[in-house]
Amino acid sequence: MMALWEIRAPRRCLDLPRGPRWVANLTIVVLDSVIVRLLFAAGAVGMAVAAAERNWGVLNQLSSPILLKIVLTVIALDFVLYLQHVMFHAVPLFWRFHMMHHADLNCDVTTGVRFHPVEVALSMVIKLGAVLLLGAAPLGVLVFEILLNATSMFNHSNIWIPEAVDRALRWMIVTPDMHRIHHSVFPQETNSNFGFNLPWWDRLLGTYRDDPLQNQTVMNLGLEQYRDPRGLTLLCILALPFVGSPGRYPLAHKDKMEGT
């Protein structure tokens, strides 16, 4: 649906043809899925079921209505995801794997599923730990996983939404215009708007940016050190964390606030 929306009502003109990018990005999705299935057979929902059966975690100690536990599970896991995202920008080693996601020179629906297999594995370890400690409701974890995948494709999509609608939606969900700023080539913009589902954490914790330095339709996306599309093939981007330069983007970089 997002792909069709992009074709019918695009927000920006794409600099690169869809074909090679989509082949690379969607191949990564297949690799990620296989690795997660091999390493974490039960997944996050399975961990939630195991925790519930053994009465582990905070929510399993409460006699709250199941609907409340589902809502709390979704909100809590979304906050964990926000903190994880900030961590992947703050810790140089983690940034090396996350920068594969940011190296995409365009931002569309396939960017929302383009994550390095090592980052996906690390993210799953963090998620399983959060589910266990929280005692997350299994149905809440399932709802969260569905929302995470859907909103990631939505907020990375190259779709046009009327500005007034976008501004209203930003109070409840991360919109494409809001998240596109996070994919700006400028480090001070890349290190903002970390939310995937809920926009509240950015607003509450001071990482929200309302508008980009450049107009949404002309702003440069990607990373400043990777501008040649020929170096962003499937094999190159998989090798990026091991051989590429992290640039000025990690939050620990001394020039992180330059230009703000």
Image: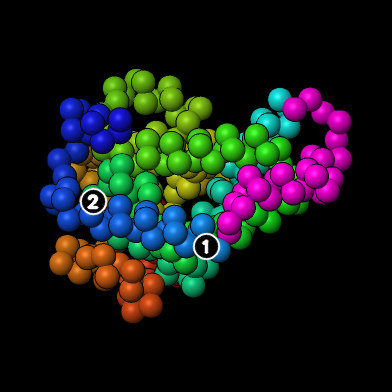
Against 210, residue 184 (above or below) is: below
Asked whether, in this view, residue 173 is left or right of residue 153, the answer is right
Residue 37 in view, yes or no: yes
Numbered disc 2: secondary structure: helix
Residue 240, image x, y percentages: 33, 72
Rendered position, 249 above or below 207: below
- Dot 1 surroundings within 10 Å: few (below 14), some, or many (20 or more)? few
Q: Which of marks 1 and 2 is in front?
A: 1
At x 37%, y 68%, the residue is 248
Name the residue type under label 2.
Trp
Q: Which of marks 1 and 2 is nearer the N terminus?
A: 2
Where residue 201 appears, as percent x and y from the top left, is 57, 41
| On-image quarter of the N terminus | top left
- Which residue is label 2 attached to? 22
Residue at image location 62% in from the left, 58% down from the top? 126
Front residue of 100/190: it is 100
Q: Name the residue under label 1.
A: 38
What residue is rendered at 42% in x and 69% in y?
96
The span shown in magenta is 40-66
Residue contact at pointers 1 and 2, CB within 8 angstroms: no
Residue depicted at 71% across the width and 25% down the height: 67
* Of the pair 120 and 167, the residue shown nearer to us: 120
Query: Would residue 101 be seen by someone viewing this image from the given angle?
Result: no
Q: Which of 13 and 163 is in front in this view?
A: 13
Q: Is residue 114 left or right of residue 80?
A: left
Give, as a three-letter code, the residue at label 1.
Answer: Leu
Locate residue 8, reporting x and y percent: 18, 27
**Res 188 quadrant in image:** bottom left
